[in-house]
Amino acid sequence: MTTLHPTPSLPHPGDLRLSLRVFLSRLLTPDAARTHGRTQLARTLEAEAHHARVQRTLLGVRP
């Protein structure tokens, strides 16, 4: 029976674990541009909703 030895082309389990951890943390952590875009969108939608409420109030329309 032959004994299998890891070849140099296989990554070390510690390196594999580290690269997987880095990959998952980057995947799960939102980047600054995406967070900024979401914040801008939320502010824009809130401003439009506020404008619509003001217009309804000025026109005398009840919600």
Image (spheres, rainbow, N blue to C red):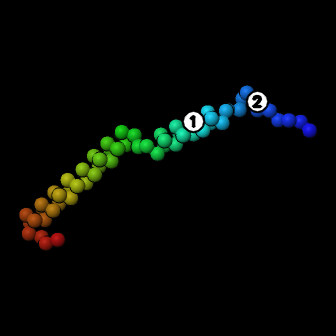
Residue at the farthest bottom position: 62
Q: Which residue is mark 1?
A: 19
Callout 2 amino acid: Thr
Residue 42 against residue 2 in the figure, above or below: below
Q: Quadrant of the C terminus?
A: bottom left
Which residue shows up at 35% across the image and 44% down it? Answer: 35
Choose between 4 and 9: the one closer to the eye: 4
Callout 1 amino acid: Ser
Residue at the farthest top position: 8
Q: Residues within 10 Å of mark 2 (few under 14, many from 20)?
A: few
Q: Which residue is mark 2?
A: 7
* Residue 38 picture location, percent across and down: 33, 48
Q: Left or right: where does residue 47 sit relative to residue 12?
A: left
Q: Earlier in the sequence, mark 2 or mark 1?
A: 2
SS for tag 2? loop
The image quarter containing residue 61 is bottom left
Which residue shows up at 15% across the image and 62% down it? Answer: 53
* Residue 51 picture location, percent across and down: 16, 57
Q: Left or right: where does residue 32 sit relative to residue 10?
A: left
* Residue 13 picture location, percent across and down: 66, 36
